[in-house]
Amino acid sequence: MNKKEDRMDSIVALCKRRGFIFQGSEIYGGLAGTWDYGPFGVKLKKNIRNIWFRRFSDNRHDMYEVDAAILMNQKVWQASGHAAGFADPLVECKKCKKRFRADQVEKISAKDDGSGLTGNPTADTGTKSYWKCESCGTSNESNVRQFNMMFQTNVGAIQDDSSISYLRPETAQGMFVNFKNILDTQHPRLPFGMAQIGKAFRNEIAPRDFLFRSREFEQIEIEYFVKPSEWEKSFEYFRSEMKGFMSDVGLSASKVHELEVPEADRAHYSKRTIDFEYDFPFGKKELYGLAYRGDFDLKQHSDFSKVDLSYYDEETKERFIPHVIEPSFGLDRTVLAILCDAYTEDEMGGEKRVYLKLHPSVAPFKVAVFPLLRNKPELIKKAEEIFKTIQTEIPMTDYDDNGNIGKRYRRQDEIGTPLCVTVDFETIEKGNGVTVRDRDSGKQERVAEGELLKYLKRKIS
Ligand code: GAP
């Protein structure tokens, strides 16, 4: 096992050990591509979500949030192009019958590898692929099939073509189909955006790398409607806002890279896409996308629904279909990037230590309060009193009197709590304040009780 795999294994193990994230349906052997969030994972995700909404919706007046149904009329997906084209290339091993994404398998030259395969040794023609099975090692010459990734279901008791529906593969379409509702009820002026958070589902051929590629995940997306001539301005604006958000949640700027996606690799609706890639332990991979969708979606939905989705500009007296800039964020990929960024091993007191160097803005707990010993009522009484005072001013404060103090520090280190406050005998006997321990350095400072709130707020702000 190489070092990168070690690191991912350690992160997955910490997530399970401390109650961040578990394999979905674990007691039945799991369900590939699904993950369940435990108490600290939920808190981490909630913090990220709140930071996102503060930047992109709460603190602005041009963003309209919706929460559309996951199940939609199948015509939505015909209009959007997903029913026909939301597919990944698939190959199947002739020996073990395992299936893989054709663009992710090890390509071979039919001539050179001695497998006896004949034919054109070109690695991949798009319809034919020469490849080695990563599971059983067999050399294959396969026809590449297109595999539609939408989960199909039937709505109602009758199962025929008319009742087909899909679990949405992106949240975006829930906004396009509500565009007219927003125009009619909110009367916005261009440019304005719609924002939505919610689950998306993709029947990925090869879910992998923990939360990175799963079959059920959460997206937060904006569809920002602009005058056609002004798309570049909004594109550049959101490019910078997306970087601002990554900094808000504490991602290292040096690990984020922008990729101008070439035309051949862009989604069918996109006229320009920038991917924000992140240096995950398993490689540099897409974290978010920023796309210029032109008028593709509104036009398609106008055509398919026969409902006019144009916008009337009162100033210029013109009617037109707005163009769309789409910043698209994967929430689970954000969680993963933050965990990978924060996971740290060092040595403290002669022992190996693991801690999450989380930015205070996303840490599940900002502060934890302990009595030094759990069997001393006077320590507990004072610690509870201090805990209550802090909690009213600093939400997401924890109280812990379980196990010895060293174990409690280790637990909070692994959860990523930036500061631990300990009430000891000096606190109650000499009125000499409390100790505050810094997660990253492990150093403790004695702080007067009257100064404590100010001190903590300054440290976590
Ligand atoms: N509406 C545009 C859209 O859905 P996308 O690039 O296919 O674009 C957007 O997905 C984001 O959703 C990705 O950048 C990623 O963060 C997240 N995402 C996509 N597929 C995912 C998967 N299988 N597992 C986890 N996150 C995924």
Image (cartoon, rainbow, N blue to C red):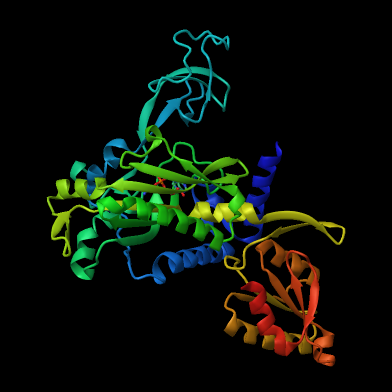
Question: In x, y percent, where is residue 57?
Answer: 39, 67
Tell me: 362 left or right of 327: right
Residue 184 in view of the camera: yes
Q: Is residue 346 above or below residue 383?
A: above
In which quadrant of the rendered image does the C terminus lie?
Answer: bottom right
The foreground one among 38 and 63 is 63
Q: Is residue 400 left or right of residue 244?
A: right
Front one among 430 and 36: 430
Report which quarter residue 150 is drawn in.
top left
**Number of callouts:** 0
Tell me the residue at 50%/54% (across/down): 332
| Residue 24 visible in the snapshot | no
- What x and y, as percent, mark residue 143? 39, 20
Locate the N terminus by quadrant: top right
Q: Determine whether, in the image, residue 41 is placed left or right of residue 423.
A: left
Vertical side of 14 occupied by 413: above or below: below
Name the residue located 61 percent from the left edge and 66 percent from the top edge: 363
Give coordinates of residue 447: x percent, y percent: 76, 83
Q: Nearer the viewer, residue 217 or 177?
A: 177
Judged from this view, the residue extending furthest toward the right is 350
Horizontal side of 26 relative to 201 (left or right) equals right
Residue 410, horizontal then vertical, whole percent:
75, 64
Considering only vertical position in the picture, is 275 above or below 95? below
Question: At x 63% / y 87%, what residue is drawn?
Answer: 389
